[in-house]
C-alpha cells in the first residue's frame, strides 16, 4: 500500500495509472454495446443451453462480451492467436528470425502481427455470423446484415488490439495482459453470485 501511495505522488506515474483506468472504462462500455442487427436474446438463450466448459471459458476471456454478442465478442483472442503464429513462424523461418534481432525488423513483425490479427478476426467473425446467422442470431439473415455484423466484430477486435498497444505505450505494464485481466475480473462478481445460489 505504501508503494502504491508513493507511486501516486509521482506525476508521470499518476497520469499513466489514470490513462489505464480510462481505457478500462472504455473496454467495459464496449463490452455492453450490442452488435447492430443481432438478436441478443436468442444468443443468450442458446448460450445458457450449452453445458460445455469451452464456451464458459471463452466468455470469461471476453468478460461476458461473447454471451451478450457485443462489438467486443471476439475480444483480443485473434491478436493472441496471431502473436503465437508469428512467434512460431519466427522460429521456423530464418528470415523472420533475423528480423527479430533488429529494431526495424521487430517493427515489421509487429505490423505483420496486426495484419494477421485483422485477417483472423475476419475469419472468426465470418464463421460466427454465418454459423449462427441462419439459426436465428441475426434479426434479418441477408448479405448486408451479415457484412455489418462481420465489420462490427473486426472493428471491435482491432480496437481492443489498439487499446492494448496504447496501454503498453502510455500506461503501465503489458496492455494485452491488462485487457485480459479486466475481462476476467469483471466476471468474478457474477460467478460468485452463481456459486452462492448453487451451493449456499
Image: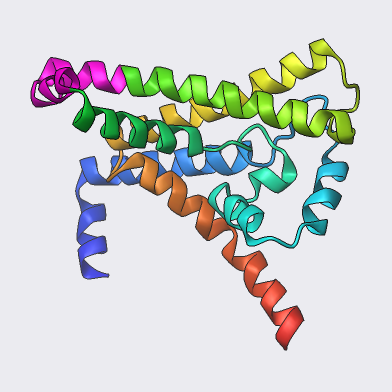
Identify the residue at horizontal 65%, vertical 53% (top origin). Answer: 55
Answer left or right for 143 relative to 128. right
Image spot of residue 163 (x, y percent):
43, 32
Above or below, 21 relative to 131: below
Residue name at image x 69 percent, y 41 percent:
32
The image's colouring method is rainbow
Q: Is residue 132 above or below residue 54?
A: above
Horizontal and vertical percent for residue 25? Answer: 53, 43
Q: Residue at x 59, y 50 (%)?
A: 58
Numbered marks: total: 0
Quadrant containing the C terminus in the rendered view = bottom right
Of all residues shown, which one is farthest toward the bottom?
200
Front position in the image: 66 or 91: 91
Report x, y in % for residue 98: 10, 21
Q: Main secondary structure of the magenta part?
A: helix
- In the picture, measured across the screen, residue 19 lies left or right of residue 7, that is right
**From what the image shows, is residue 190 above or below residue 43?**
below
> Magenta stretch: residue 96 in it?
yes
Residue sitting at the far front: 92
Q: Which residues are magenta?
A: 94-111
Q: Is residue 84 magenta?
A: no
Quarter of the figure with residue 143: top right
Instruction: Say above or below: 26 vs 46.
Output: above
Relative placement, left or right, of 125 versus 134 is: left
| Quarter holding residue 122 | top right
Taking the view exactly as shown, the residue that stands out farthest to the top is 144
What residue is rendered at 76% in x and 26% in y?
130
Which quarter of the rendered picture does the N terminus lie within? bottom left
Q: Position of residue 111 (x, y in %)?
A: 32, 17
For residue 117, what is the image quadrant? top left
Amino acid at each position: 500500500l505504501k508503494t502504491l501511495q508513493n507511486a501516486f505522488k509521482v506525476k508521470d506515474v499518476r497520469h499513466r495509472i489514470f490513462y489505464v483506468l480510462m481505457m478500462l472504462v472504455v473496454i467495459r462500455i464496449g463490452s455492453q454495446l450490442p452488435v447492430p442487427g443481432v438478436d441478443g436474446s436468442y444468443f443468450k438463450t442458446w448460450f445458457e443451453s450449452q453445458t460445455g466448459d469451452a464456451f464458459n471459458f471463452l466468455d470469461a476471456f471476453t468478460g461476458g462480451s461473447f454471451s451478450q454478442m457485443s462489438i467486443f465478442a471476439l475480444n483480443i483472442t485473434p491478436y493472441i492467436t496471431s502473436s503465437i503464429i508469428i512467434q512460431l513462424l519466427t522460429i521456423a523461418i530464418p528470415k523472420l528470425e533475423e528480423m527479430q534481432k533488429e529494431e526495424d525488423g521487430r517493427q515489421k513483425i509487429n505490423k505483420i502481427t496486426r495484419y494477421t490479427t485483422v485477417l483472423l478476426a475476419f475469419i472468426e467473425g465470418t464463421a460466427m455470423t454465418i454459423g449462427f446467422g441462419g439459426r436465428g442470431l441475426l434479426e434479418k439473415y441477408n448479405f448486408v446484415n451479415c457484412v455489418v455484423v462481420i465489420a462490427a466484430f473486426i472493428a471491435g477486435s482491432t480496437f481492443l488490439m489498439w487499446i492494448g498497444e496504447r496501454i503498453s505505450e502510455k500506461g503501465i505494464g503489458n496492455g494485452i495482459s491488462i485487457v485480459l485481466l479486466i475481462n476476467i475480473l469483471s466476471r468474478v462478481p457474477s460467478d460468485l453470485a452463481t456459486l452462492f445460489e448453487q451451493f449456499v
